[in-house]
Amino acid sequence: MWTEKGMGKKGWGNGFWLVCAWFVGRERGRFLAVMLMLSTILSGCAVKPGQDEGALQKNEDGIKIGMTFDTFILERWIRDRDVFVSTAQKLGAVVDVQNANGDVKKQKEHIRQFIEEDVDVIVVIAVDSYGLAEEIGRAKDKGIRVMSYDRLLQGVASDLFITVDSVKVGEEMAEAILKRLPDGGEVVMICGPETDKNSTDMVQGFEACIEDSNLTVVRKTYAKAWTPEYGFQAATEALGDVPKIDAVMCGNDALAGYAIRALSERQMAGSTIVVGQDADLEACQRIVEGTQTMTVYKPIEGLAKKAAECAVQLAKGEEPVQDKESFQLTSDGLKVPYLGLDPIAVTAENMDEAIIESGFHMRDEVYLNVE
């Protein structure tokens, strides 16, 4: 045995190599066996000429989808995103998700970026359904398929429009109010942006349903955008100086929340009928608590999953809609293939069945302030 101090640097170095030589000689058989095994494994894993290039090429040739959202402020869009991306990935597609934060200029930039990236399909949840025609036209000129998701793009014919039937959403809202006010009453309408065709379709369905009833619309307001500041402004303005309010129709559950806040200040929350849509968690909580009467559940997960499947079909050159009679018209008369899912009216009576049993929200969350 020796020490570093006794041997010095040179002696230590020579001693080290002597030990190595002794060890290798002693373990030569085992050493060679291990090296042979490693050689076999590495040769089996070695990339054959051109194999990695082929794998990369296959990845590059995979389906690429560009998806631009209006905003993620609304709870439902986060669900849409997660289900869509998960489904598309299972089908072998890559999804580039962008958030415009309510800015149509930013959404135009997203679409131009997707065109430069030469994606196969562009999916648009439009900030302004009427403001993207030029960019969508460029995409189609390059052979890129375009899907209108939940909101129909105007001024250009997209390859598919998939949504929950907004006219039926309005009808369900009207039916909920008529059921509770069979003898009539005063109704305030707080609608979503007029730039969102879903808003106008919903209003159309609502007004057609109450046309021959004893309900009277005493005020109708449109929010400028689906953002908190505009939503709160629309609700406070709509309810501010109306002397009598029996019911409030709201373009979505966020607007319903602002309306209920304003009604609370007048000690009218709970006694005034309030309806919305999207089945947001807070809306479901308000329903079981008694301040919101009803929400319209749009089967978001089913919609997003179907949309992802359709996007992959479009990328492959297939047509998801086979029925030529199933289409929607843009404001300038262009036909767009259409897939529409039916909405579900949700009240305190069917909350468990429609929302909790379906797994859309957890029971503990919905009944957080009740049980």
Image (cartoon, rainbow, N blue to C red):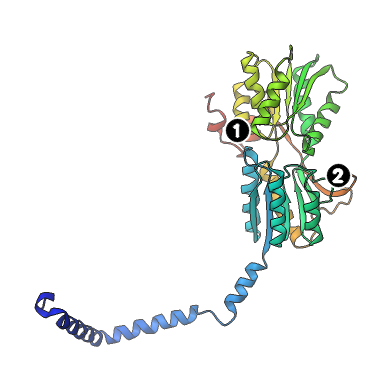
Q: Tell me the element at label 2.
A: loop
In this view of the protein, can residue 360 be seen by the observer?
Answer: yes
Which residue occupies the extreme front position in the image? 105
* Amino acid at dot 2: Thr
Q: Quadrant of residue 164?
A: top right
* Label located before the other in sequence (2 or 1): 1
Task: Report crowding for label 2: few under 14, some 14 to 19, many 20 or more residues within 10 A (C-alpha).
Answer: some
Task: Report crowding for label 1: few under 14, some 14 to 19, many 20 or more residues within 10 A (C-alpha).
Answer: some
Q: Residue at the spot x=70%, y=52% of the render?
A: 109
Up/down of 13 relative to 72, above or below: below
* Amino acid at dot 1: Leu
Q: Position of residue 302 (x, y in %)?
A: 69, 45
Q: Residue at the spot x=45%, y=79% of the render?
A: 42
Q: Which mark is residue 13?
A: none
Contact between labelled residues 1 and 2, with CB atoms less than 8 Å apart: no
In this view of the protein, can residue 348 be seen by the observer?
Answer: no
Query: For mark 1, what is the residue?
Result: 281
Q: Quadrant of residue 28?
A: bottom left
Which residue occupies the extreme top position in the image? 243
Mark 2 and mark 1: Cα distance apart in space:
33 Å
Horizontal side, residue 107 vs residue 140: left or right: left
Q: Quadrant of residue 121?
A: bottom right
Horizontal side, residue 57 vs residue 19: left or right: right
Query: For mark 2, what is the residue?
Result: 330
Q: Position of residue 115 (x, y in %)?
A: 72, 59
Q: Nearer the viewer, mark 2 or mark 1?
A: 2
Q: Residue at the spot x=62%, y=43% of the render?
A: 78
